[in-house]
Image: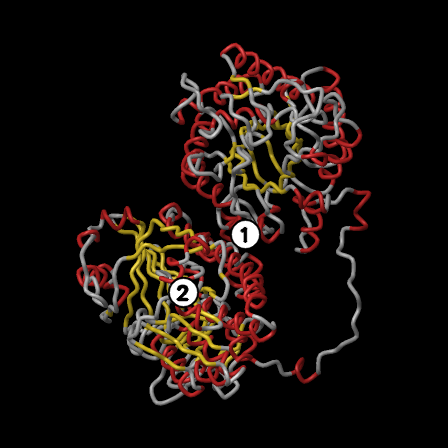
Amino acid sequence: MKIAIIGGGPGGLYFAALMKQLDPAHDITVWERNAPDDTFGFGVVFSDETLGGIENADTTIAQDMARRFARWTDIDIHYRGESHTVGGQGFAAMSRKELLRLLQERCHALGVTLRFSTPAPDTERLRGSYDLVVGADGVNSLVRAAHAEVFRPSLDRRHSKYMWLGTDLVFEAFQFFVKQTEWGVVQVHGYPYSATGSTFIVEMHEDVWRQAGFDTTEGADFAPGASDEHAVARVRELFAHELDGHQVFANNSKWLNFTTVRNERWHHGNLVLIGDAAHTAHFSIGSGTKLAMEDALALAACLHEHPDAERALTAYESERRPVVESTQRAAQGSLEWFENIGMYVHQEPTQFCFNLLTRSRRITYDNLRTRDPEFADRVDMAFAAAQGLDGVAPAMFQPYRLGELELKNRVIVSPMDMYSAVDGVPGDFHLVHLGSKAMGGAGLVMTEMVCVSPEGRITPGCTGLWNGEQGDSWRRIVSFVHERSTARIGLQLGHSGRKGSTRLMWEGMDDPLPEDNWEVVGPSPLPYGPGSAVPRELTREDMDRIAADFVAAARRGAEAGFDLLELHCAHGYLLSSFLSPVANRRTDAYGGPLGNRLRFPLEVFDAVREAWPAERPMIVRISATDWVPDGNTEHDAVEIARAFIAHGADAIDVSSGQVTKDERPAFGRSYQTPFADRIRHEVAAATGAAVIAVGAIASYDDVNSLLLAGRADLCAIGRTHLYDPHWTLHAAAEQEYRGTGAEWPAQFRAGGRKPPAARTDAIRPRLSLLRPDPADQAVHLRWTPARGGIRSTGGDTPASSRGCRTAGVSTIWPGPGGSCRRRPTGSRGPDTS
């Protein structure tokens, strides 16, 4: 093949080297507009997984890189004047300039043509004379811009300012300096990359940046390669204590706003994007260099495995896109956490550290317990102490008081519509469905949305509470839950609004009924989506009647014995549609600004709260974002939650979306929890109201992680309970927990232990059992470069050609002039011995 590569960064160079090794006959040319020794930034970080792929593909490059790595396993978090260390993470970093030099030398040795200080020819011209053209020209890609109509990029410019700097202070581990200033929180992400230097990234929200006066040079026209020396001097002054007399170095260092790059397509004919040209992920979870080199690996492999470029590029995109999108979701969570770091500075230090470490939702409590058991124990003890509880149990099995209602644990079976009622009457199916979930160990079981009138149903199969027969049937279900389990049961009340009169879910979700329709209503005559019925705009008289229906249903629910009531103001149903500007275009006192859109839902809440027994809690479910432009956002959700709490809501159940068919949700594991997190810290924590997280929370590890980090007080889990009605009890068995938070029914107690798995007679060699390697017990390894060769400190086993190791974490290979240093478990702060 004849291959043109535009961009001589790590991704482009590594791809060139790999392709030339696969077939020396490939004719490969790399164009780079900068000089070969021009490089911006300081160090780059790699994961063990990436390094394994590099080692398999090109042992020469892998060995050259390994000799230059700074290796460590610790993270130090400096917060409120204290330093906290968490071990077992596993990092490898090196100088970006060194990496580029190695890759350039490798390409030269293999016969790749490198043209530095030379802009690439026009892309279309290259496409006509080369078999393959690779756009590896970075975040500001000219290749991507020239073909934007095909790649369809989206560029999400974020709210924080950051600057990439270096320092001659050689850190022993990854450093997070979280500094509370008079202007707000400023943080540093720092890590070593050699025996002589460390990366020092300064980041703060743009509001803090302006208040601190860093905007003095905003709009300044810096020469190419020049740095914002005014800002660098301010950073030196601001972090003088942390730098302890060491220097800060600039290299084309200017204030930037991180831009998340996404493209709908990555290839077009014989043109393909890799690295930052195709996608970016925030620096707080890894490096763009890592992703670019992984792209190069995958692209080279696909080209080698497929007979033509088109099939190879399709395979490349199919292979890499899910991995990249998963990384970007994690990066987005991490990015937004740091944007909003000011929300968390009230947290107790151990919880703050745990929150920081689990910010992307990729690292969880179980991950940390595997990596650093001592730190996990501290997290457990801090959580129990904050709750005023004796003893330590998994967070999900700690009790919780919601108003005057005591819940045995923090697991809720989320409301799930079953569409299986007849004339609104719940039957045996609902008894088994809700009864099995209650016996399965959850602390609170919620009904599906129970409709307040026949016209308020979503489908003909929806349950209701508009007559006595329905009330009697619900009383039977509630009595079963109370008599046969220690769970509590809650009633969710709602009205379908413009989403009503539709088929059963499995017959066509949201499709209007073909016959026997009933009139649908809403705040405005706007249909839910194409093909949906146009609702009639409610009058004041209609609103009074519907509010009265809610009150009557609440009274029947109280008589049936429900322990809790949830008002459904989410998912585009009637009260939710009043809250959303997408569905509410009224020009009277019930439309327009958010305060007006809140008016009717709050009127209904107040009326129901007055009718509902005062000693029983009342909560509200909201959609925190509409997932569409011009719809409600997480900022609106904070104000909506604030309003309901002010009116007496005991908790806010934070869901999202389903307000319009045009929505574009960012699905992913625990994808809605950041909304709950924001509401908890901005509103609920100060008022004593609880926050319930919901949305793709699929494991007990996720539940524990969310609770321990302080992102929610309770977790509602839906589909997982359909998969396993005894999910909560099984989670207790998996964690070897026995206690009042998860008691098996007497009839099921014999099954309360996890069944044995397949047996194996394999026995570990006795020598291993008698003489375990002491290095296998290490959790904390520090990067401590020493002059004059490799040295071992603290009584460790001498570093040898086999390197230093941590059990189950990573293999640590000491580089020249440096050693891996183990830190005693449980120590805090920098080891200055």
* Residue, disc 1: 705
What's the coloring here? secondary structure
Is 595 placed above or below 353 here?
Answer: above
Identified at 57% across, 29% down, the residue is 404
The local crowd at label 1, few if under 14, some if 14 to 19, many if 20 or more residues have their Cα within 10 Å, is many
Task: Classify residue 162 as left or right of residue 47.
Answer: left
Looking at numbered disc 2 in the image, what kind of residue is underneath it? Glu
Give the x, y percent position of residue 123.
39, 66
Q: Could you tell me how far apart the alpha carbons at marks 2 and 1 are, in whole angstroms?
A: 50 Å
Identified at 38% across, 26% down, the residue is 593
Give the x, y percent position of residue 340.
38, 47
The local crowd at label 2, few if under 14, some if 14 to 19, many if 20 or more residues have their Cα within 10 Å, is some
Secondary structure under the numbered disc 1 in the rendered image: helix
Give the x, y percent position of residue 714.
56, 41
Q: Quadrant of the C terminus?
A: bottom left
Looking at numbered disc 1 in the image, what kind of residue is underneath it? Ser
Relative depth, front residue between 417 and 738: 417
Q: Nearer the viewer, mark 2 or mark 1?
A: 2
Residue 403 appears anywhere in the view: no
Secondary structure under the numbered disc 2 in the rendered image: helix
Q: Quadrant of residue 121?
A: bottom left
* Residue, disc 2: 124
